[in-house]
Structures are given as structure tokens and as C-alpha cells.
Image (cartoon, rainbow, N blue to C red):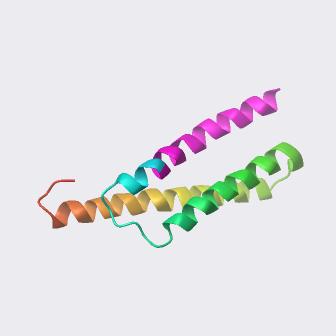
Amino acid sequence: MERFQAMERNAVENETFFLILAASWPSIPVDMPDWAPTALLVFVYLRFVHFALYCFIKIQPWRAISWTLSTVVLNAMAINILISLSKKGTSGSGEL
């Protein structure tokens, strides 16, 4: 039972931010890069891999690798949004 509670906590900590980011990305007034749809799919795939490794295999380093790669993808998406918003803010009328 503890393992399932830990999985739930892990999902809440990681996937909540992703869902907010993924849902808001199309509505943010920035130019979406060509790699954006691929990044979204890669993140979801890596989280499923992490889940499967966590539930069934329980060995490292593969679980850590899948988590690290999904975090890199998530951070790349967030950084892209921040950079795009800062460029838009400095090139326009000063509004974000």
C-alpha cells in the first residue's frame, strides 16, 4: 500500500505542473516551436515508462533515467515559454 501512495504522490508532484503547462501552452501568445508536440508526447511516454518501472521492475538506474529525461523535457518546455514571453514583452508595447 505504501508503494501506491508513493506513486500517487509522485504523480501529483510531477504531472500537475505538466498538465498546467501543456494546457496553457497553446493559449499563451507565443510562437510554439516545431518540437513542441513531440516534447509533449515524449514527456507522456517517459512518465508511462517511469510508472511501469516503478510498479513492476523496481530497479535502478532505468527509473531514474526516465524521470530525469521527463524532467529535462518539462523544463525545456517551461524555459521556452519564459523566453518567448520575455521576447514578446520587450519587442511590443511592453505588455505581456
Task: State the quadrant of the N terminus.
Answer: top right
Magenta-drawn stretch contains 2: yes
Q: Main secondary structure of the magenta part?
A: helix
Residue plotted at (46% across, 73% down): 34
Q: Nearer the viewer, residue 72 or 84?
A: 84
Instruction: Judge from the rendering whether residue 25 lies leftward or rightward of residue 44; answer left or right.
Output: left
Residue 73 lies in quadrant: bottom right
Residue plotted at (56% across, 59% down): 40
Instruction: Judge from the rendering whether residue 6 lies leftward or rightward of residue 34; answer left or right.
Output: right
6 to 67, vertically: above or below: above
5 to 58, vertically: above or below: above
Q: Is residue 71 visible?
A: yes
Residue plotted at (73% across, 33% down): 6
Outermost right residue: 57
Position in image of residue 38 (x %, y %)? 57, 67
Q: Nearer the viewer, residue 48 or 1?
A: 48
Q: Is residue 61 visible?
A: no
Outermost top residue: 1
Residue plotted at (32% across, 64% down): 84
Instruction: Judge from the rendering whether residue 69 lies leftward or rightward of residue 48; answer left or right.
Output: left
Magenta-drawn stretch contains 17: yes
Outermost bottom residue: 34
86 to 48, vertically: above or below: below
Position in image of residue 46 (x %, y %)? 69, 57
Residue interval drawn in magenta: 1-22
